[in-house]
Amino acid sequence: MKHIPNWPQFDETEAEAVAAVVRSGNWWRGAYDSPEGNPTGETGAVQQFERAVADLHGAAYGLAVSSGTMALDIAVRALGIGPGDEVITTAYSYVATATCILQSGATPVFADLNPDTWNLDPGAVRRAITQKTRAIILVHFAGLPVDMDALLEIAKEHDLYVIEDAAHAFGAEWRGRKVGAIGHIGCFSFQGSKNLTTGEGGAIVTNDETLATRCRSLHMAGRVIGGAWYDHERLGWNGRMTEFQAAIGLVQLQRFPDQQQRREANARRLAAGLAEVPGISVQTEPGEDGVHGRHLFCFRYEKDQFGGLSHKRMYMALRAAGLPVLTGYGRPIYHNDVFAEFDAVEWAERCPNAEQLCTSGFWLHHAVLLAEPAEIDELVEAMKGVKARYHKEKPQRTV
Ligand SMILES: *Cc1c(COP(=O)(O)O)cnc(C)c1O
């Protein structure tokens, strides 16, 4: 691929939206949130944005925050999870999926994933449950919806909370329901690389009023919601989104449906093309069960089918052929020094599939899926070229 489509996509509309916020002089949500500051009852950009995000996902409550990391930190704390509690999550994700557990003083427990879906394996989650387990944090990896029926059943059986890390899955669906609003709390990220971006930013969605109020309080220094401004009842953060970010988000929301349609069509085209290449396994397609969020296009390769090329060499071969792949996470989360107090060797033994994906998986960023269909076909041809070049037939035995 000669030219990867630019990301983010924007024009003067975003510039104008930000300029309008500048000119208004109301740069933060407080300018609209407090009745004294906003006697006319005008709706600010952050208020509009969080409402739109909640509506899009069929959630009763939405809260815009400063990042996806902040959303996760708040979600765990809002559920009252703390020291002595265990939270089960995946080891193949961005670090914030698990550091939110440490931030609350609880103990992370990593369960392995299914190498075809790249999502938590319900069986592995079940085996990881102990008397101390309080919650499951699942990731709809790359945008592929997790089997929510299986996970919710486990959660119900063991009385566990379900937090959806939907940072990859804005707009994705599981059996007719938008992800993020299926479990107890859903978290989104609008950081620069995500499918809907405000530069930095995040959101929390939930259908539970008590949780929604707690999250709102936690994101504004533990304030008493509806109380006096300097009245604080819990330990919180300043996790507020600015009016500038939300103004951009509102414009990006308009662009989102067309972009997703394009990503969806190209991802299907690419998946169908790559399915013809032996030794390449594309992440499972949701099929009838849902709608993929298309944040990443993921596949793994079988070394033996590519002349024994190492992950690094395969990366170089793919890049040289014009496939703008990324190698993804270099190692499962628990190998980061921030988890040094836990036994990484034991986790590695429990999560062979997560370990394996780090040395066999590749990603394409969603911007690639915004290219022309003809360029997607070129990617398939490039892969076939790599295959032809490196695949070595096993020597035939001669009689
Ligand atoms: C991006 C991301 C986050 C964190 O979002 P930030 O906005 O960067 O803090 C959390 N989880 C996953 C899976 C992500 O990809």
Image (spheres, grey):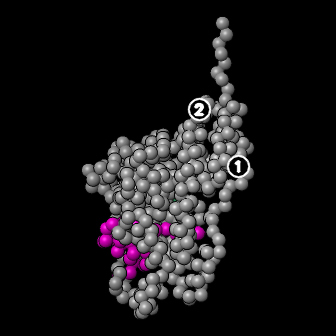
The earlier-in-sequence mark between 1 and 2 is 1
Mark number, residue 278 = 2
> What residue do we see at 53% from left, 63% from top?
256
64 to 194, vertically: above or below: below
Residue 307 lies, in percent from the top left, at 66, 30
Residue 68 lies, in percent from the top left, at 49, 65
Determine whether, in the image, residue 388 is placed left or right of residue 74.
right
Residue lying farthest to the top in this orientation: 399
Mark 2 lies on a secondary structure that is loop
Residue 200 located within the stretch drawn in magenta: yes
> What residue do we see at 39% from left, 75% from top?
216
Cα–Cα span, label 1 and label 2: 22 Å
Pick the front one: 383 or 34: 383
**Magenta segment, which residues?**
199-224
Q: Assess mark 1: CB under 8 A from ligand 1?
A: no
Mark number, residue 205 = none
Determine whether, in the image, residue 155 is placed left or right of residue 68.
left
Mark 1 lies on a secondary structure that is loop
Residue 84 lies, in percent from the top left, at 34, 59
> What residue do we see at 40% from left, 90% from top?
35
Residue 339 lies, in percent from the top left, at 49, 55
14 to 284, vertically: above or below: below
User: Label 1 belongs to which residue?
Assistant: 1
**Residues at discs 1 and 2 in contact (Cβ within 8 Å):** no
As shown in the figure, which amino acid type bears the numbered disc 2? Pro
- Asked if one can make out residue 240 in the rendered structure from this viewpoint, the answer is no
Pick the front one: 331 or 216: 216
As shown in the figure, which amino acid type bears the numbered disc 1? Met
